[in-house]
Amino acid sequence: MTVALSAKEVAAKLEQQLPSGIIESNEGSILVNSEFLPDIIAFLKTTPEFDFDYLNYITAVDYLDYFELVYQLTSMNHNHSLVIKTRCYGRENPSVPSIVDLFVAANPQEREIYDLMGIRFEGHPNLKRMFLWEGFEGHPQRKDYL
Amino acid sequence: MEIERPGDFIYSDTDVDLYEGQAIEELKANSRVPIPDPDEWLDEEIQQNILLTTVDWVLNWGRRSSPWVSLCFPACCAFEFIAAMGPRFDISRFGMEILRASPRQADLMITAGTLTWKHAPNIRRIYNQMAEPKWVIAMGACAVSGGIFRSGYNVVPGYNHIIPVDVYIPGCPPRPESLIQGIQMLQEKIAKRKNFA
């Protein structure tokens, strides 16, 4: 069974590296500043102590005030996992940096989130609709759709 | 101990051969003309080797007795279809045991799943690829009307918005008996088809 790392302990180590990146952390997850998201994930991926080499999923939640993106990372070697969250604000054009450069698996998932939630991923190489057709109005997974 | 001598036969060996030869010659002499086939039970028309029917009837008989099926986009209805293909329900009794992977070889399209608008152009293209004459059975609530997904933003409310449907089979999913009844209804429809209108 994969061990869920204590997010507080990981956040303490991350704060030494990127002090302004961490907003808050609890036992389950780390909430990070979306500007520093690629840096933080790159750090977690490359540091041998963590060695997060596998992206389980990216998903997005609509809280009406803001969108929250959830990333789960897993290390195959150490058999542990971690949940990272970040927020983006605004209904019109919310955006977060893309992590396709770090994980290829993020490519279709970010497209799906863009398609259904309307969150732009800056730096994505092919950000266009995936399940719906070009010209579809709105983003159906948003809570205020319909 | 003295061995008993065999007794004399009634006929000599030469006599037996002679009788046999005579019987063969007699049979051969009497068998110059073949015995007529026992065809008294046949009626007059068949004795003349002529069947009277209409071309329509023959074409429709052939078409309704062997529709080749292309199963399109099956979802949960597929399991009922598989059960209908299996030995318990066995729709090969109706000449439908051949499933085609290509619509170009199929006469009958059975649509057994939800259709989304993104996929709708493809199903029209697939329908256009089927050779004439062609028929469509909408199997299940999703194919008939969109089913429980009807109010979804991307669901086509029924295949009849995209292609003409001949037979609707309600049910979610329909039992194999329903599918068989739908096929029989389609066969009745094909039987009434006018090929030379």
Image (tube, helix red, strand yellow):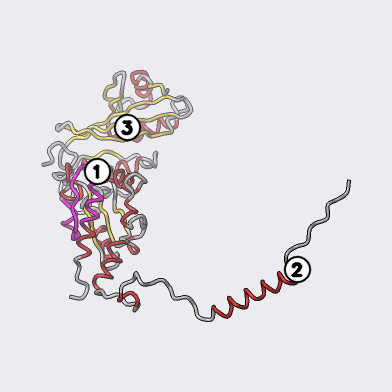
In primary-sequence order, the first of circles 1 and 2 is 2
Secondary structure type for disc 2:
helix
The residue under label 2 is which amino acid type?
Asp
The answer to whether B153 is drawn above or below residue B185 in the figure is above
Q: Residue furthest left?
A: A146
Corner quadrant of residue B45: bottom left
Q: Which label is found at residue B13?
A: 2
- At 20% from the left edge and 47% from the top edge, which residue is drawn? B142
Which residue, given by chain and number where applicable, does mark 3 sit on? A71
Judge whether A14 appears above or below B55 on screen.
above
Say which residue appears at 24% left-offset and 70% top-offset.
Answer: B57
**Tag shown at residue B194:** none
Lateral position of residue B32 relative to residue B170, left or right: right
Quarter holding residue B196: bottom left
Would residue B34 appear left or right of A112 to someone viewing this image?
right
- The magenta segment is B158-185
Q: Is residue B178 magenta?
A: yes
Locate the C terminus of chain A by quadrant: top left
Chain ID, mark 3: A
Q: Which mark is residue B175?
A: 1
Comparing B68 with A58, the one in front is B68
How many angstroms separate mark 1 from mark 3 (CA)? 43 Å
Tag 1: Cα neighbours inside 10 Å, few (<14), some, or many (≥20)?
Answer: some
Horizontal side of residue B158 vs A102, given as left or right: left
Picture coordinates of residue B5 (x, y %)? 83, 55
Q: Amino acid at mark 1?
A: Arg
In this view, the mark in front (1 or 2): 2
- What chain does badge 2 belong to? B
Q: CA distance from mark 2 to mark 3?
A: 108 Å
Which element carries disc 3, helix, strand or loop?
strand
The residue under label 3 is which amino acid type? Tyr
Total numbered badges shown on the rendered structure: 3
